[in-house]
Image: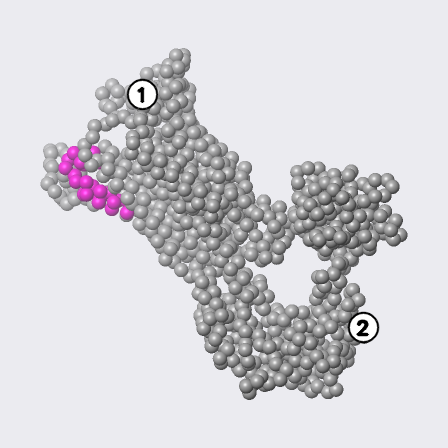
């Protein structure tokens, strides 16, 4: 470019680039960065923090998903987190085949190799944990001297052999290993020490059962064994191998119980297994190797499982297996992967909503920083254009100036995120980290090019006098349409199918609110401007005049504050909704702050002992009888509760499980002279009872009840229920049978700050078989999963980041207008405005727009939570898949307005604005007045 030289002036190029003394042009970027080192450092720090957050979120989500998948697999029994192959064992040789009826250990090993060869990556089977054997297909009832019979029923036995690496898992405690020979219909077996203790078995004990031909088979205990590793798949693959379990006969009322246990025989005696009723089954359990699995492998893993169970790989296994007709199943693993996939989709949708909100707030703040820089350098850039500088040349120099700061800062922030959060993949993090530098690099050159594309005279754009153009109206209507469409889609489809539009609904609602406020803001200014002139003071008229002459394009600070407050309150509502759902579900399941439960009845004196525990304020004894039915009525089973009405009413009021109405304790008292028992029943049971009385089969005899009140839920039991007075039930039992049938089985304990260890110790001191359940532990266990914990941490970070960006946007807005405000205040001070009046003017001029943004943000946040509540399901965030599958909770988690997130961020922003305004008013001292007076006397103008 041509140079312009004037005597006594520094040599510069035509576009304003300063020349060095030697005649060469000084580097633009280095000169500008040296001239504004503080601004460059602040911009670099902002970009670095934004890039760190943007790059860390996908890696954090991926790490949480991987941890959640491995946690779910590790917490599932081996027989439910692997591939299981079963084959019916024929009583004789299969027609047309040369296969033996009962597979040998060699054939079991060969079948293991066949399945391993057929499995496709990422499905990797754990060789060390593979279990193969043969067992009876159905448990058989056995008889024997001294066997434990809880309800008088004979225990059931499962015989099995697991010949693969059996010596590595079994330790002989007493006796000897079982013999492979079968003599006189007698087979030897070993049982675990725990099984022997529960079933009253010793070395030499025998049990008997009839085989399929009617002959009596005898099983003699030859030894007692113990596991070398209780958690090994060898012991966990088959139920009740380690210790017996109590089972119930579900089609009887009350349901009787019986023991089921397993015994190990030698593989040489495997021929006796098909003689049992129902035959025998060969089984192979192949647990999946979980160490290298990631959430990204789930689709491929599901495809491999489908091929192995019902696809071409299943056909290959059948053709190559040495055992006839093997069936491959992985139902437990498929169910687990489906539950994890549902959790992951919901968690990703919620994280996407938070990420879009924080990203929008960050983008607005970065654009604000560039806009303030462009406004501050307007005169400089206008001079460069007047001296012949081209728009491409100026734009490229400004781009180089911002890129020299933003690109290294984004690289540093992304590198810190990659180092801080370990994850296998980094492509998304690199892309988002680089995207954080884009608005910081482009805002200044784009705004400069748009402002100086052609010479324009300075035109005032007062907010009170501005009239929206048609183009602005079209843009606003488009934003409103997008917000309404996204809101409708989110309410219909929910968060399980979130897309970028539905994820941006909170941001779009904030944008719509900002547009509405900008439309409505000039109206009160116009209405108050003329009456304010008649006031005696000068502060209010000057403040209204200054507010009315503010630029009408100041939408960015308001938008940033609204978006930040909406994101903060939405994140707080997500966390509050998940916490409230867990607390509600824990109260429904436990019934109080703690529950002490017995298998039969509570020991005498327990309630007095529990009352002495620190933190206990009240106790309620309840007798719970499950599985009751109405005589003569086809009804669903319900639970009969016998309670002390007054203490139970206090408990219902304390827990809130009374439907909002006081519990009718007085109505449960039985009328003198007998009659049916008054009962508080659930809605389903009330429909079946009607207005009459119905006979209920209690444990010790029938009792006639009638409904006096209906409640949707009640402490101590979920589902259908009937609550009666324990004293009334006792009186009815004595009248019918002459005995007391209402001994309590459950003790519900209330109190804040319960000492769980002391409570457990006191209960176990009264009886060893008592079960103590704490509400706090139950509540913590609902959401104790890596995915839930990680998503909650992401939302906590989103709340903090949203509040930070909102505060930063407010600071940028106030600091950007500070020089012009100081100049006006100094000029007014030279005209006689007092110091106190000046400070009042600064506050009256600055705080109304801030208050508008803060109050509008709080209102928008509350409206957003109310509008989004039907479409946001937080249940997978509040409860793990295992908690939902167990059926321990039936509470749906929804958005719950959080008072802290709705109140404290707006108050903090308002306090920050007041503090900044007070500091600015205090700094506008005598020096500014003196400098401005000198400028006015010399004729200098801004």
Q: Secondary structure at mark 2?
A: loop
Q: Residue at x 67, y 85 (%)?
A: 180
* Vertical side of 447 occupied by 468: above or below: above
The one nearer the camera, 576 or 706, is: 706
Instruction: Find the distance from the CA under tag 1 to the CA under tag 2.
Output: 106 Å
As displayed, is residue 695 above or below residue 857?
below
Q: Nearer the viewer, residue 391 or 33?
A: 391
Q: Earlier in the sequence, mark 1 or mark 2?
A: 2
- Residue 185 occupies which quadrant of the picture? bottom right
Looking at the picture, tell me which residue is in the foreground, 339 or 618: 339
Q: Which mark is residue 579?
A: none
The disc at residue 146 is 2
| Range drawn in magenta | 381-403
Report whether residue 834 is seen: no
Q: Position of residue 171 (x, y in %)?
A: 66, 77
Of 482 and 510, which appears nearest the observer? 482
- Image location (x, y in percent) of residue 112: 53, 78
Q: Hey, which quadrant is residue 264 in on the image?
A: bottom right
Residue 298 in sight: yes
In this picture, residue 702 sits left or right of residue 794? right
Q: Which residue is mark 1?
A: 827
Image quadrant occupied by the N terminus: top left
Query: Is residue 725 a member of the stretch shown in magenta?
Result: no
Is 584 situated left or right of 600 in this image?
A: left
> In this figure, which colouring scheme has been used for the structure?
one colour
């Amino acid at each position: 470019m041509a140079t312009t030289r004037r005597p006594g002036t520094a040599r510069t190029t035509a576009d304003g680039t300063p020349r060095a003394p030697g005649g060469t042009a000084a580097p633009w970027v280095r000169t500008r960065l040296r001239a504004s080192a503080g601004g460059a450092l602040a911009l670099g720090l902002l970009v670095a923090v934004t890039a760190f957050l943007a790059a860390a979120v996908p890696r954090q989500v991926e790490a949480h998903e991987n941890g959640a998948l491995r946690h779910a697999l590790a917490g599932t029994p081996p027989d439910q987190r692997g591939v299981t192959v079963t084959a019916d064992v024929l009583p004789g040789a299969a027609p047309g085949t040369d296969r033996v009826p009962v597979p040998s250990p060699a054939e079991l090993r060969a079948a293991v190799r066949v399945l391993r060869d057929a499995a496709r990556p990422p499905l990797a089977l754990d060789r060390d944990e593979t279990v193969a054997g043969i067992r009876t297909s159905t448990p058989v009832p056995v008889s024997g001297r001294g066997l434990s019979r809880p309800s008088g029923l004979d225990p059931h036995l499962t015989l099995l052999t697991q010949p693969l690496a059996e010596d590595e898992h079994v330790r002989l405690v007493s006796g000897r290993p079982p013999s492979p020979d079968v003599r006189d219909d007698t087979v030897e077996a070993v049982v675990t020490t725990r099984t022997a203790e529960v079933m009253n078995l010793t070395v030499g004990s025998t049990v008997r059962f009839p085989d399929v031909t009617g002959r009596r088979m005898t099983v003699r205990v030859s030894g007692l064994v113990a596991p070398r590793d209780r958690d090994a798949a060898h012991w966990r693959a088959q139920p009740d191998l380690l210790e017996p379990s109590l089972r119930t006969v579900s089609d009887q009322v009350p349901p009787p119980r019986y023991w089921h246990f397993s015994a190990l025989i030698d593989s040489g005696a495997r021929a006796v297994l098909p003689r049992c009723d129902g035959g025998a089954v060969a089984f192979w359990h192949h647990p999946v190797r979980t160490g290298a699995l990631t959430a990204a492998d789930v689709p491929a893993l599901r495809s491999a499982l489908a091929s192995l169970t019902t696809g071409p790989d299943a056909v290959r296994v059948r053709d190559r297996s040495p055992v006839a007709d093997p069936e491959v199943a992985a139902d437990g693993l498929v169910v687990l992967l489906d539950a994890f996939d549902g959790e992951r989709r919901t968690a990703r949708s919620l994280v996407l909503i938070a990420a879009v909100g924080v990203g929008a707030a960050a983008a607005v703040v970065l654009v604000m920083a560039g806009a303030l820089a462009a406004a501050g350098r307007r005169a400089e850039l206008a001079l460069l254009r007047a001296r012949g500088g081209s728009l491409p040349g100026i734009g490229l120099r400004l781009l180089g100036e911002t890129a020299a700061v933003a690109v290294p800062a984004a690289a540093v922030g992304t590198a810190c995120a990659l180092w801080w959060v370990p994850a296998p993949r980094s492509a998304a993090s690199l892309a988002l980290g680089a995207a954080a530098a884009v608005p910081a690099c482009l805002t200044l050159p784009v705004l400069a090019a748009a402002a100086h594309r052609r010479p324009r005279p300075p035109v005032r754009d007062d907010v009170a006098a501005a009239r929206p153009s048609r183009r602005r109206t079209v843009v606003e209507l488009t934003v409103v349409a997008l917000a309404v469409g996204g809101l409708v889609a989110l309410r219909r489809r929910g968060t399980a199918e979130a897309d970028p539009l539905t994820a941006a609904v909170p941001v779009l609602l904030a944008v719509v609110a900002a547009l509405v406020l900008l439309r409505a803001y000039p109206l009160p200014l116009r209405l108050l401007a003329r009456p304010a002139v008649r006031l005696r003071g000068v502060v209010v008229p000057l403040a209204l005049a200054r507010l009315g002459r503010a630029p009408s394009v100041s939408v960015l600070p308001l938008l940033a504050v609204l978006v930040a407050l909406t994101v903060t309150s939405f994140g707080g509502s997500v966390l509050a909704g998940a916490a409230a759902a867990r607390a509600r579900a824990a109260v429904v399941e436990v019934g109080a702050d703690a529950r002490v439960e017995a298998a039969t009845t509570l020991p005498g004196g327990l309630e007095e002992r529990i009352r002495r525990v620190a933190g206990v304020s009240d106790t309620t004894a309840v007798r719970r009888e499950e599985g009751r039915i109405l005589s003569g009525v086809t009804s669903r089973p319900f639970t009969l509760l016998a309670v002390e009405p007054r203490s139970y009413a206090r408990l219902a009021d304390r827990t809130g499980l009374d439907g909002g109405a006081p519990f009718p304790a007085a109505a449960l008292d039985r009328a003198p002279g007998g009659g049916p028992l008054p009962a508080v029943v659930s809605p389903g049971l009330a429909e079946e009872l009607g207005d009459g009385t119905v006979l209920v089969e209690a444990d010790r005899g029938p009792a006639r009840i009638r409904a006096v009140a209906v409640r949707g839920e009640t402490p101590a039991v979920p589902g259908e229920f009937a609550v009666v007075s324990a004293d009334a039930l006792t009186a009815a039992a004595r009248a019918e049978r002459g005995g007391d049938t209402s001994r309590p089985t459950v003790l519900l304990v209330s109190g804040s700050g319960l000492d769980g260890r002391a409570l457990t110790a006191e209960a176990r001191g009264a009886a060893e078989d008592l079960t103590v359940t704490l509400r706090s532990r139950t509540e913590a266990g609902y959401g104790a999963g890596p995915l839930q914990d990680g998503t909650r941490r992401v939302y906590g970070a989103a709340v903090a980041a949203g509040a930070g960006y909102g505060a930063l946007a407010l600071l940028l807005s106030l600091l950007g207008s500070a020089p012009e405000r100081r100049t006006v205040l100094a000029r007014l001070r030279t005209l006689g405005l007092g110091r106190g009046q000046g400070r009042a003017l600064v506050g009256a001029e600055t705080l109304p727009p801030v208050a508008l943004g803060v109050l509008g943000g709080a209102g928008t946040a509350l409206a957003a939570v109310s509008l989004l509540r039907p479409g946001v399901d937080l249940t997978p965030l509040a409860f793990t898949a295992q908690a939902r599958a167990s059926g321990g909770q039936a509470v749906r988690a929804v958005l719950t307005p959080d008072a802290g997130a709705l109140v404290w961020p707006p108050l903090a922003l308002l306090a920050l604005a007041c503090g900044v305004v007070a500091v600015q008013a205090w700094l506008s001292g005598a020096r500014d007045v003196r400098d401005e007076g000198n400028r006015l006397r010399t004729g200098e103008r801004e």
